[in-house]
Amino acid sequence: MAAPRPKHKTRTVILLACILAAMLTLVGFSVPLYRLFCAATGYNGTTQRVADDAGAVSPRVVTVQFSTSIAPDLPWRFEPVKRSVQVHLGEEKLVYFSATNLSDTPIVGHATFNVTPAKVGLYFDKIQCFCFSDERLAPGKTVLMPVDFFVDPALDKDPNAKDVGTITLSYTFFRADKPDDIQNLSRFDPNAPPDPIRGARLFADRCSGCHTLDHAKIGPPLGTVFDRAAGSVAGYPYSAALKKAKLTWTVANLDHWLADPEALVPGNKMPIKVLEPNTRRDIVAYLEHLRADRTATASGSTADNR
């Protein structure tokens, strides 16, 4: 008859099994965890993704240059519209990249990116980019893809970055082997119809940090913004400039406001712009869709009460 196994040995075996399971789990998730770490810290030249440019503009100017490449099995042409731009630290900048599908079939690609010198990755902030999802491009089509970015003024306070005068943002497009979260690059076509569904996602990404639909947050509520007089939500501390603007929110006025609040109402407190026209178009379409839903609901209620 075999001697009973000591309890401490049993505990040791269980502990080792748990450690092994944890190690296997970490191996399975090491790549996404690494990508999350890079995105959160800017490690190894990975850029940051942010909701808006909230920093002050610095006198310091840097040159941002762009580099592009494609994987050998991807029949696309991919290049920046401009090879470089000059920006002040904290200045929001919108640039475009051109992509053409040279094949006769739709292809889903995915872009990876990095920044050099690597020490600048922490300070390079993307507001909008085609590199956050798998992108489908129709055969023979060419699109202009926007990248909206700024370089954090905190770069100027980093003694290790005092020598940085040029930053290189590099992209490589690969064929997506297992496409996920597929977006159609046709959304950047300026002639495409407004897309309120995309607008809802953009509102969540770009606006929800400051605005809700039904109550004041950092900014006033936007669910009923159309046909409302600017500066008229009770209890919200608007700037004097917006209160005196005598402006009613229409599709055109809201588009102008998002593009450049200071140009539409000088002296207002709105610090954020939405530079990319298609993004503005779809956000406005989403808010307009909410108005249409409310109108339909009100009409239905009136009919039911007759």
Image (spheres, grey):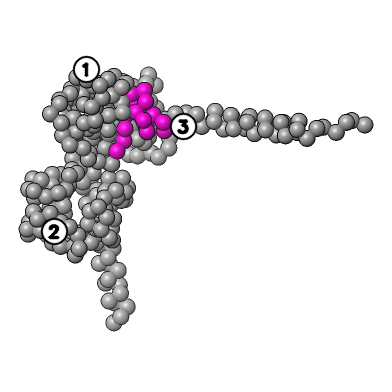
Give whichever of 55, 35 is nearer the camera. 55
Q: Residue at x 25, y 52 (%)?
A: 218
Secondary structure type for disc 1 = loop
Checking the image for residue 230, the label placed there is 2
Q: Nearer the viewer, mark 3 or mark 1?
A: 1
Q: CA distance from mark 3 to mark 2?
A: 45 Å
Instruction: Report if residue 43 lies within the magenta region.
Output: yes
Q: Which residues are magenta?
A: 36-50
Residue 298 in view, yes or no: yes
Amino acid type indicated by mark 1: Asp
Horizontally, residue 16 falls left or right of residue 299, namely right
Amino acid type indicated by mark 2: Ala
Q: How many marks?
A: 3
Q: Main secondary structure of the magenta part?
A: helix
The answer to whether residue 306 is above or below residue 173 is below
Q: Which residue is mark 1?
A: 163
Q: Residue 206 at what x, y percent from top left?
A: 27, 45
Give whichever of 70, 210 is nearer the camera. 210
Q: Which residue is mark 3?
A: 33
Secondary structure type for disc 2 = loop
Q: Residue at x 27, y 34 (%)?
A: 126
Amino acid type indicated by mark 3: Leu
For the C terminus, the image quarter is bottom left
